[in-house]
Amino acid sequence: MKIKVSIALVSFVVCLCGLTTLAQAQEQKAQLYVIWDVVVKPSTVGDFEAATKEEVALYAKYKFPYTWTVSRTFDNHYYFLIPVENFAGIDDIFTAFDKVEEMAGEEYKKLQDLFVGSYEYVQPAVYSLNYELSFLPEKKEAESEGGNFVCWDIQYINAGKEEEYEQIIKEFQGLFKSKNVSQAWYCYQGIMGEKTPVYYWVSRAKNAVDFYTQNAKMWEALGEEGDSFHEKIMKLIRKREMKTGWYRPDLSYTSKEK
């Protein structure tokens, strides 16, 4: 769903997470994303999803050049996620949106009418998938590969404590690696938004049972040392949220353009 925002006016936040295919090498360059957090009314979920599928069809028809992925939490946040190479590329995304609107004309207006009244609000944001802070095991559980169940551990950090927080995370990674933990956690770091500093920790699994089984194994392996790191981290956090939901490929869009 398009919301016009100039890069000079970007001031927004998101709870992460439409998921894309993620590589496991921590040496990877951080990936920027433009994200839309759409809070949908429970009574209009069906209407909103039907409109989103119409949106996918329209953007495919007019060859929109950017792929987006969608995830939904159980409290009806829909996260639309578009990868972007750099900040300058954000303007290119909105230019592409404008081009589709111009070409589609009345079709576009009818599409937007389908969304009216179906959601409470939309919050766009810019986030970075930070591989250096992510917990990426050498070998993940086979049953967790490619799963659509998603857990978000959202940690809002006390202002000025980012450096200390990240240092603890890097030390924690050493314990994580030494214990051969198999559950992966990807760190999405808030770059621009009213609730920064904030870090979204995202883990994906086959289903809820798979996720909680692997999470229990993780904490069992980390033991008392893991509990100690957890306590250090919690002392730097001003607010924490836990969300679960699903990656929604049926609402996502894959560009055929190169």
Image (cartoon, rainbow, N blue to C red):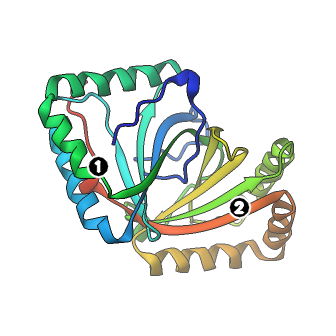
Q: Give SS at disc 1.
A: loop
Amino acid type indicated by mark 2: Phe
Pick the residue in front: 141 or 71.
Answer: 71
Q: Of the numbered discs in the image, which one, if any, rests on residue 38?
A: none
- Picture layout, residue 77 above or below residue 143: above
Location of the N terminus (image quadrant): top left
Amino acid type indicated by mark 1: Ser
Q: Is residue 197 visible?
A: yes
**Gap in angstroms between the C-alphas marked 1 and 2:** 33 Å
Q: Earlier in the sequence, mark 1 or mark 2?
A: 2
Q: Is residue 236 left or right of residue 199?
A: right
Q: Is residue 188 left or right of residue 95?
A: right
Residue at x 24% of width, y 34% of height? 255
x and y, in percent, of residue 135 in the image: 64, 54
Badge nearest the viewer, 1 or 2:
1
- Residue 180 quadrant: bottom right
Pick the residue in front: 186 or 158.
Answer: 158
- Residue 190 quadrant: top right
Please say if the residues under marks 1 and 2 sit with CB atoms less than 8 Å apart: no
- Residue 177 quadrant: bottom right
Q: Of the numbered discs in the image, which one, if any, rests on residue 252?
A: 1
Please give the residue where the numbered disc 2 appears in the rendered image: 176
